Amino acid sequence: MEFTACRLCGSVPAVDTTFRGHRGMLVLMQFLSTPGPFCRDCGLGVFRHMTARTLVQGWYGYASMIITPITVIMNLIRRGKVARLTPPQPHPYAPSRQPMDPGPRLLQRPMSWIGVGIPVALVVLIIVLASASGS
């Protein structure tokens, strides 16, 4: 019998997926990825980490204003693959260790709220500047 094991802890079941991140800079940008397979707990932990960092670091460039939301949506879709898995169990035929602690949910992380606030603040700033220049 063949099992797909988590690449981080060796537990089963696991699903093969890749979580992505984006770091926008004024002129440059950096695309990040962490490939699986992941068990449920490790996958949720990687999803939360990569997505929270993308929400904070992804907005700082022209193209990044479009790429960041797409990256977050892609991660949300991939999150579903790992969230539907049963709780991780030790691999019956290979070594495994304790799965990663997924940590707080995405919207329970202060970094996520800061990341969501950045584009909102930018839109408010643009509106204020546009209305001030029109007067």
Image (spheres, rainbow, N blue to C red):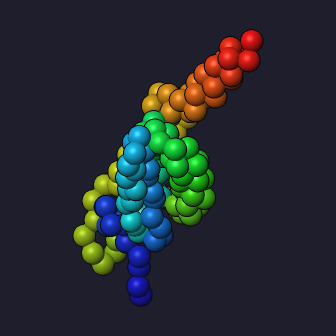
Camera-nearest residue between 86 and 119: 119
Camera-nearest residue between 83 and 119: 119
Q: Residue furthest bottom?
A: 1
Instruction: Give the residue at x 45% y 58%.
Output: 19
Q: Position of residue 66 (x, y in %)?
A: 58, 49
Q: Position of residue 85 (x, y in %)?
A: 54, 63
29 to 122, vertically: above or below: below
Q: Residue furthest right?
A: 135
Camera-nearest residue between 85 and 55: 55
Instruction: Give the residue at x 31% y 61%.
Output: 8
**64 sits left or right of 35 in the view:** right
Instruction: Give the residue at x 68% y 22%.
Output: 130
56 to 40, vertically: above or below: above
Q: Residue furthest left?
A: 95
Instruction: Give the residue at x 43% y 52%.
Output: 21
80 to 106, vertically: above or below: below
Residue 109 in sight here? no
**45 sits left or right of 117 in the view:** left
Camera-nearest residue between 87 and 114: 114
Quarter-of-image position of residue 127? top right
Which quarter shows the C terminus?
top right
Q: Position of residue 78 (x, y in %)?
A: 55, 61
**33 sits left or right of 17 in the view:** left
Residue 32 in sight here? yes
Which quarter shows the N terminus?
bottom left
Number of labelled discs?
0
Q: Position of residue 101 (x, y in %)?
A: 38, 46
